[in-house]
Image (cartoon, coloured by chain):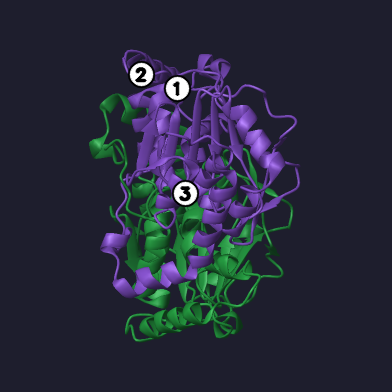
Chain colours: A green, B purple
Amino acid sequence: MKITRRKLITGAVGLSAVGAAAVAVKDQLPSVDEAQRMAKAHDALMKLPDLKLYGDEKIAMLLYPGFTALDMVGPNYFLASMMGAKVHLVSATLEPIKTDLGYALVPDTTFADCPEHVDLLFVPGGATGTLAAARHAPTLDFVRSRAATAKYISSVCTGSLILGAAGLLKGKRATSHWLVRNELAGFGAIPVDERVVVDGNLYTGAGVSAGLDLGLTLLGQLRGAAYAEAMQLQAEYAPKPPYDAGTPDKSRPELLEALRVMYDNFVQQTRSIASTSAV
Amino acid sequence: MKITRRKLITGAVGLSAVGAAAVAVKDQLPSVDEAQRMAKAHDALMKLPDLKLYGDEKIAMLLYPGFTALDMVGPNYFLASMMGAKVHLVSATLEPIKTDLGYALVPDTTFADCPEHVDLLFVPGGATGTLAAARHAPTLDFVRSRAATAKYISSVCTGSLILGAAGLLKGKRATSHWLVRNELAGFGAIPVDERVVVDGNLYTGAGVSAGLDLGLTLLGQLRGAAYAEAMQLQAEYAPKPPYDAGTPDKSRPELLEALRVMYDNFVQQTRSIASTSAV
């Protein structure tokens, strides 16, 4: 389902894996008019100075029991659109992985089979499952090993706790879900209240939905602003939330307190993990 | 992983399935102070006039080969948070379903086993796979049968083409991905250029990422504004895209034209489906 250089040569101008599907379904060659329009569009793209249309990035996105699907699926939408890139959904085994909302995604690569050197390592968040992953030696070993040579290291939401437990946040500016953002200090990080925090090759996103902003940021970094803008248009990512309560300072006090109480144990456990994995 | 009334009675104040996990992991009863704080938070919630904390909604979210994961995972995040609700991921069989980006999700309910009456029916979009689903009689039969008695019917992105092919858009205001929004007229709908379009019990969302706005809108409708705001806070849904190119009018002309060319065949096929399924 991915566009390849070869498919482009056969007449398709495309930017994404989704687009490839639209091309693959054609049961006839394009007309002369169509082919000319395609060629013209392709030429126009190739003139954009801030576009890298082709590449061969290797991307490893970690899955573990209880991860939050949206944390991964958001950035995946943008990263998997990169023509020539290969995205691996990596887990200990190839068994379906249950997310925190009960349904399962199927990984396609084991820790053992994941390429040794990846361009981008990504870690999603979650609740209990994330704490378990942050205490799971094989998971931490995998994260540490790929992070050692990855061009970029990234996380969304509480995924940064796993990076922290792997010792990857020391001295780094980073963020997490607002509930535990300040707990990153326990891992030696400098907590920053921003939607996407970049420190060198470390890209951390805030809670859950920040994955879309993180994914688009990484796409722009890897393939240039034009590619990211095209995928923003394909995703019709012009968000318009029907409420304005997405951060603690915008929340009604009763709702903020309810979430704090509900996750109090989660925060306590985060502290406990930080204290045992600290320098 | 869902909070139940019983768990609440044991001392947990919670709003979401994710929260339930934080509670379930406790290996000891809360302290007196904790329990008092929980009870106080719960009482404060119960006084909110625009909150319906408990319910028993049945929700059917359709999966089909080639659907776009983000279209479903976005609204699912909000809908699956509803305490007492049951979300079914429904497909023809229980085999894992490949999304348009190549990885697979596992459905949990077959067409045959899905409850006959659901409160909410949801249909995600995609590319080639969506066109195939819009031509697939068992899929259309399922959609039509559940739509007949559903309290709400909803879609994201090109999912509205499936609703159209099932004859559910006649005379209705609706939206879709911007590429095919105007093609909805071919199904007898009135295309509307809005992020989320509500016409009676029909809730349609624009392209891909609009699923978050649609999900939050539906959550507010089903459980009140306070519940939706709490989940917006949990999702930290305060979007901040790093680019501003999410709609055709904001796009660079070269990128808009490239996407139009790439999806030209998709648009043609949409017209063909509309013409054969028209009144």
Question: Which badge, 1 or 2, is on the more N-terminal residue?
Answer: 1
Distance between mark 1 and mark 2 Cα atoms: 9 Å
* Real-space Cα separation, disc 2 to disc 3, in angstroms: 34 Å
Residues under numbered marks 1 and 2 in contact, where contact means CB atoms less than 8 Å apart: yes
Q: Report x, y in % for residue B224.
A: 37, 23
Q: Earlier in the sequence, mark 3 or mark 1?
A: 1
Q: Residue at coordinates 56% horizontally, 30% vertically from top-left?
A: B26
Inter-mark Cα distance, 3 to 1: 35 Å
Q: Chain of mark 2?
A: B
Residue occupied by mark 1? B13
> On what subunit does the disc labeled 1 rest?
B
Query: Pointer 3: what residue?
Result: B157
Residue B45 numbered mark, or none: 2
Q: Is residue A241 left or right of residue A105?
A: left
**Residue A110 or B204: which is nearer the viewer?**
B204
Dot 1, crowdedness within 10 Å: few (<14), some or many (≥20)?
Answer: many
Image quadrant for the C terminus of chain B?
Answer: top right
Tell me the element at label 2: helix
Q: Amino acid at mark 2?
A: Leu
